[in-house]
Amino acid sequence: SQKIEQNSEALNIQEGKTATLTCNYTNYSPAYLQWYRQDPGRGPVFLLLIRENEKEKRKERLKVTFDTTLKQSLFHITASQPADSATYLCALDASGTYKYIFGTGTRLKVLA
Amino acid sequence: DAGVTQSPTHLIKTRGQQVTLRCSPKSGHDTVSWYQQALGQGPQFIFQYYEEEERQRGNFPDRFSGHQFPNYSSELNVNALLLGDSALYLCASSRTGPSSYNSPLHFGNGTRLTVT
């Protein structure tokens, strides 16, 4: 069956450290993978998109990697800050369709 | 430039009732997708509208239906409400491009539906 898995346990990290979140998928062949941030009571906000032929993408303190062989994406936040505390969702396109499928999200808490 | 707006923000309904949720997409976007998000879960795809037609549907029963208007705004209708329909309903807009590529989704802040 098709699955997108993110670590459902919350990730607590000290301010200034690098947070690394994982997104694994099975039985999908996405052309794109995206990461979103969601704060409580709000809709998700788009952060980064990476294509299947890209290994790595960066935006300010954010970095995403995409390994189609391992069927995995890693999302890194360097020099993390308490304001980075939120739930982070990965999403991929279900190939041959126009829909994006989301993982369950990982809750990140950055401790001051 | 207004982003995605949804109304109402909160709604309480009784089992068996019907509900209509509304969404206005971000300016320049022509595609609207609806998602259901239960507490502690990721958004689940309900369906997507493009050119006033339902283009794609997720694994939701026919009680869930929708509509897209010529101005790209959209409605989600749910009939015969069940307790399990209680969730945050998110609308997301995007632009459809070539080769089934959609631009990243812009979400509204959702409608919190409670069914009692």
Image (cartoon, coloured by chain):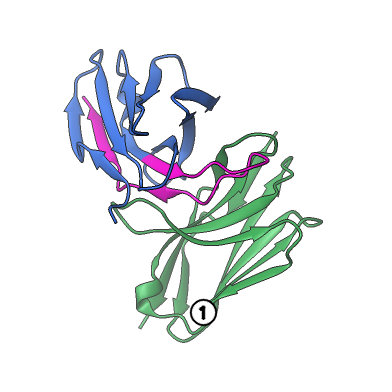
Chain colours: A green, B blue
Q: Is residue A90 above or below residue B56?
A: below
User: B98 or B48: which is nearer to us?
Assistant: B98
User: Which residue is drawn at the image coordinates 31% and 56% (left, top)?
Assistant: A40
User: Which residue is drawn at the image coordinates 32% and 27% (left, top)?
Assistant: B75
Place of residue B51 in the rendered image (x, y in percent of width and height, measured from the top left): 47, 28
Quick check: B111 left or right of B70? left
Point out the image quarter for the C terminus of chain A: bottom left
Place of residue A31 in the rendered image (x, y in percent of width and height, measured from the top left): 70, 49
| Magenta residues (range) | B91-116
Q: Residue furthest right?
A: A69
Q: Secondary structure at mark 1?
A: loop
Q: Is residue B59 visible?
A: no
Q: Is residue B57 above or below residue A40?
A: above
Residue kind at label 1, given as amino acid type: Arg
Place of residue B103 in the rendered image (x, y in percent of width and height, measured from the top left): 53, 49
Q: Residues within 10 Å of mark 1 (few under 14, many from 20)?
A: few
Quick check: A109 left or right of B102? left
Q: Report the label total.
A: 1
Q: Is residue A11 above or below residue B110?
A: below
Q: Is residue A38 above or below residue B84?
A: below
Check residue B58 for magenta coloring: no
Q: Is residue A97 visible?
A: yes
Q: Chain of mark 1?
A: A
Res. B87 image quadrant: top left
User: Which residue is drawn at the image coordinates 64% and 65% (left, top)?
Assistant: A74
Res. A21 image quadrant: bottom right
Place of residue B77 in the rendered image (x, y in percent of width and height, measured from the top left): 32, 21
User: Which residue is drawn at the image coordinates 74% and 44% (left, top)?
Assistant: A29
Point out the image quarter for the N terminus of chain A: top right
Quick check: B85 left or right of B46? left
Check residue B99 for magenta coloring: yes
Q: Which residue is mark 1?
A: A61
